[in-house]
Image (cartoon, rainbow, N blue to C red):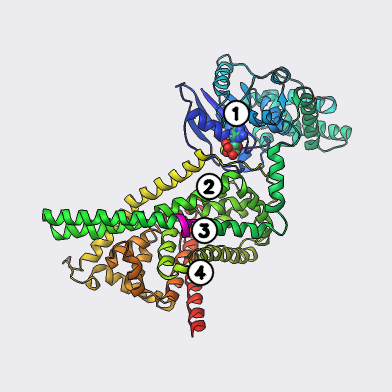
């Protein structure tokens, strides 16, 4: 038994999905968070599962969310539909409901957010709604787990008894005649294609291309349909789409007039409007954004994250000493001993010690997202993004790019135009991903301890600015044309849910730790091996005779103009391609510095200026292998993917070169 969760964006589908299945999908106070359909088994009923679908306002075939959801309903034919509606905004939600009813799939209405309706003294006459729409309706509050048992009991009952929605005739006059005339014309075609007749007829009146194509009508039939539509348009004096919109809203208005006690402006709405008068203010919005980001970075690096990291480092040092002493006492072969202490513990430990910083940053970012602030920023950013040929919609994938380029590139999939999508994918790697954070944290602590938050923000901003530059370049060369218009609803500000904040942190931590013990672990062993043996596999005494040193020397020339030519640095940059954190673990292994000594050791390799140039290079150079693979999947071409790698690396080299040369000139 498969239930589809269908509803407007941000009405609580994923929240309900998580409650029903006990899973932990990402919930965001942010339209467009759910990109793909996700399936999960309902707790306590083994033969029933639910599918979380992207949020939509209508069953038209324009945006990719609409296409995904519509295809799922039409092709996979779930056994039942759970239509979630936001009870604080029933009118708008019912617009989709009216179209879902036409699909003739057993269906139930879940009126979510009843807690907010009640808190604002509103009320909904559920019996009335049930009666008029001819489907069961249950009031729930997904976030507070209220009404869920009742909802699922009734949902299962609807499917068991195969109770399809009543064929209510909500249309009147000319539209009514057009729909019925077309229904007769296409009935046999629709049945052959497995499309609900009433749905197909309505869609033809609207002028829906995919439905028209899939019905495989004859020339004659198409002509008759057009004739019917033209007559209807003439009679109503509106166009075909508007005729249906009007008709649906008329019906909804009547229904709500009878069954809903309006809550007017909820107190949540009023609070949101007050906050927005500053946070999306024409002039204040941007400075407010910068201030909030500064606060987040300062708390992360200056106050909380750094101190936690220091504690963890002490713990790791202590572990290393104990293991070291233990292995010496045991008399383990010195080469294996060095692999364990100088290879694995040093390398993996160097990465692990940054977990607290990453967690603290994501703690703040997920609060900003869950509260609803990030969608304001998408709105504020629409105007500047338009200047570089993108729309505010591209902001969501770009924002995800600050976490990890892989999901960011995947999120770009929802952009409706191919041009916007490709351009967004090319720009997301400029948003500095979280794996680069340990590198920044280490280097800024070593060289710019006093201005740490400032340098950190400068780096992030620099990525953004170079992204903008790149966008401008592309807008005038390979991606001419205009971005799609941007419409997004701003959800009310909400108090962040601790569960979803903690969940996101836990996911991040798990991801980071897993990477430390897989990719970083392997890279560390390979680096240790290449560094400990020479070309004839003799154990080397000094690192500069090793295999690795030879490879490093070969390419170090490329980096000399940027101010860092040491072979250990060039090697670290190569391993950084597997995962960015590997830059740190490689430097730790190669300089054989304990985690606390690493900062000091860096001073023998870099000057503050060359350290900054190095940071700029790492900020911009090629995305890691996982990101490159994802880009390849979305682009579908190896040429495009190679272009991304070369473009980014070339850009990085030039930027670091400029920074270094200008710096040298300024410092005299
Ligand atoms: P989706 O876009 O439909 O998947 O919506 P989400 O599940 O991501 O939820 C959107 C927002 O609504 C989140 O901030 C949730 O915490 C919030 N939310 C979901 N259900 C309820 C509810 O029953 N009551 C209240 N007050 N908020 C809810
Ligand atoms: Mg969702």
* Side (left or right) of 570 relative to 649: left
In this rendering, which labeled residue sits more in front, label 2 or label 3? 3
Residues at discs 2 and 4 in contact (Cβ within 8 Å)? no
* Side (left or right) of 91 relative to 552: right
SS class, disc 2: helix
Please report the residue visible at 49 percent of the width from the left and 86 percent of the height from the top.
Answer: 668
Q: Which sits earlier in the primary sequence, circle 2 or circle 3? A: 3
SS class, disc 3: helix
Q: Position of residue 188 (x, y in %)?
A: 68, 23
Q: Which residues are magenta?
A: 298-304
Please report the residue visible at 20 percent of the width from the left and 54 percent of the height from the top.
Answer: 323
300 falls in the magenta region: yes
CA–CA distance between discs 1 and 4?
A: 50 Å
In this rendering, which labeled residue sits more in front, label 1 or label 4? 1
Q: Which sits earlier in the primary sequence, circle 2 or circle 4? A: 2
Compare residues 88 and 412 and report the one nearer the observer: 88
Q: Which sits earlier in the primary sequence, circle 3 or circle 4? A: 3
Residue 651: assigned label: 4
């Amino acid at each position: 038994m498969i239930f589809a969760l269908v509803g407007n964006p941000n009405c609580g589908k994923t929240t309900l999905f998580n409650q029903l299945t006990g899973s932990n999908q990402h919930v965001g106070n942010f339209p467009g968070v759910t990109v793909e359909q996700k399936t999960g088994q309902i707790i306590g009923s083994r033969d029933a599962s639910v599918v979380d679908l992207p949020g939509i306002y209508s069953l038209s075939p324009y945006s990719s969310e609409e296409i995904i959801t519509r295809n799922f309903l039409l092709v996979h034919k779930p056994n039942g539909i759970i239509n979630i509606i936001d009870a604080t905004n029933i009118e708008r939600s019912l617009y989709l409901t009216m179209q879902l009813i036409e699909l003739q799939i057993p269906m139930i209405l879940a009126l979510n957010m009843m807690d907010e309706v009640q808190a604002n003294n509103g009320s909904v006459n559920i019996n009335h709604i049930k009666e008029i729409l001819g489907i069961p309706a249950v009031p729930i509050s997904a976030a507070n787990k209220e009404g869920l048992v009742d909802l699922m009991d009734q949902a299962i009952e609807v499917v068991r008894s195969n109770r399809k929605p009543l064929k209510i005739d909500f249309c009147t006059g000319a539209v009514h005649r057009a729909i019925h005339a077309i229904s007769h014309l296409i009935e046999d075609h629709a049945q052959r294609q497995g499309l609900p007749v009433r749905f197909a007829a309505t869609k033809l009146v609207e002028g829906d291309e995919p439905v028209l194509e899939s019905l495989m009508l004859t020339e004659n039939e198409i002509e008759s349909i057009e004739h019917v539509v033209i007559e209807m348009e003439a009679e109503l004096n509106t166009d075909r789409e508007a005729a249906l919109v009007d008709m649906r809203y008329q019906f909804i208005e009547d229904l709500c007039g009878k069954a809903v006690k309006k809550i007017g402006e909820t107190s949540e709405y009023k609070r949101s409007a007050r906050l927005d008068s500053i946070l999306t203010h024409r002039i204040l919005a941007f400075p407010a954004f910068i201030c909030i980001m500064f606060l987040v970075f300062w708390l992360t690096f200056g106050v909380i994250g750094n101190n936690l990291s220091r504690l963890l480092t002490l713990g790791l040092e202590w572990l290393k000493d104990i293991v070291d002493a233990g292995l010496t006492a045991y008399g383990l072969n010195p080469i294996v001993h060095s692999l364990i202490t100088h290879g694995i513990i040093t390398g993996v430990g160097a990465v692990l010690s940054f977990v607290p910083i990453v967690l603290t940053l994501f703690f703040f970012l997920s609060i900003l997202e869950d509260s609803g602030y990030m969608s304001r920023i998408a709105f504020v950013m629409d105007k500047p993004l338009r200047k570089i040929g993108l729309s505010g919609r591209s902001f969501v994938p770009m924002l995800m790019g600050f976490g990890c380029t892989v999901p960011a590139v995947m999120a770009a999939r929802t952009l409706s135009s191919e041009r916007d999508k490709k351009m967004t994918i090319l720009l997301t790697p400029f948003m500095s991903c979280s794996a680069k954070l340990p590198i920044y944290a280490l280097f800024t602590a070593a060289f710019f301890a006093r201005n740490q938050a400032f340098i950190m923000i400068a780096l992030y901003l620099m990525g953004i600015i170079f992204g903008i530059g790149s966008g401008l370049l592309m807008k005038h060369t390979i991606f001419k044309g205009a971005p799609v218009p941007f419409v997004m609803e701003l959800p009310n500000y909400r108090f962040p849910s601790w569960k979803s904040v903690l969940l996101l942190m836990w996911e991040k931590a798990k991801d980071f730790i897993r990477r430390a013990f897989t990719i970083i672990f392997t890279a560390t062993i390979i680096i240790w091996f290449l560094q400990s043996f020479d070309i004839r596999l003799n154990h080397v005494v000094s690192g500069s005779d090793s295999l690795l040193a030879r490879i490093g020397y070969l390419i170090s020339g490329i980096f000399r103009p940027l101010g860092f030519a040491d072979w250990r640095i060039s090697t670290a940059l190569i391993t950084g391609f597997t995962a960015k954190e590997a830059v740190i673990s490689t430097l730790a292994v190669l300089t054989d510095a304990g985690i606390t000594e690493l900062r000091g050791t860096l001073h023998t390799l870099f000057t503050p200026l060359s350290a900054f140039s190095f940071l700029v290079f790492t900020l911009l150079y090629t995305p890691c292998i996982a990101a490159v693979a994802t880009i390849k999947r979305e682009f579908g071409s190896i040429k495009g993917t190679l272009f991304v790698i070369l473009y980014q690396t070339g850009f990085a080299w030039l930027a670091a070169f400029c920074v270094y040369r200008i710096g040298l000139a300024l410092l005299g």
